[in-house]
Image (spheres, rainbow, N blue to C red):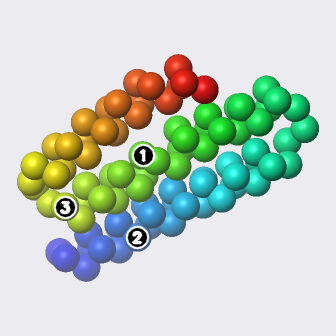
Amino acid sequence: MEAVLDILSWILIVIGGTFGIIGGLGIVRLPTFFTRIHAAGMTETMCAPPIVLAMMLQAGWSLVTFKLAAILLFLFLTSPTAS
């Protein structure tokens, strides 16, 4: 069971990191201000949640998991508005 959680966590971290790298390239390569803002917003929305979910899997059932869930909810509510 421990190995399954580790593998799933690594998959989520790789997914989040991939979105982060692609979003960073989009911020650098896109031509106008508004397309760069769109890339930044999509990066924040698609990069952070898989990484936070991976941390939740590694934390197990604890107070840390509850705090990470609160951070995830906060990100889902504020990321679209901020960008």
Where is mark 1, residue-wise? 49
Residue ID at (43%, 61%): 12
Mark in front: 3 vs 2: 3
Circles 1 and 2 in contact, beta carbons < 8 Å: no
* Side (left or right) of 83 relative to 24: left
* Side (left or right) of 50 relative to 42: left
- N-terminal of the pair, mark 1 or mark 2, is 2
- N-terminal of the pair, mark 3 or mark 2, is 2
Circles 3 and 2 in contact, beta carbons < 8 Å: no
**Residue 10 on image: x %, y %:** 40, 70
* Side (left or right) of 71 relative to 41: left
Instruction: Pick whichever, 19 or 37, lies toward us.
Output: 37
Where is mark 3, residue-wise? 59
Disc 3 residue type (three-letter) = Ala
Q: Residues within 10 Å of mark 2 (few under 14, many from 20)?
A: some
Q: In this view, which residue lies farthest toward the bottom?
A: 3
Q: In this view, which residue lies farthest toward the right?
A: 31
In the picture shown, does residue 72 fall above or below 34? below
Where is mark 2, residue-wise? 10
Residue ID at (70%, 52%): 24
User: Element type at marker 2?
Assistant: helix
* Side (left or right) of 23 relative to 65: right
In the picture shown, does residue 29 fall above or below 83? below
Asked which quadrant contains residue 62, the reply is bottom left
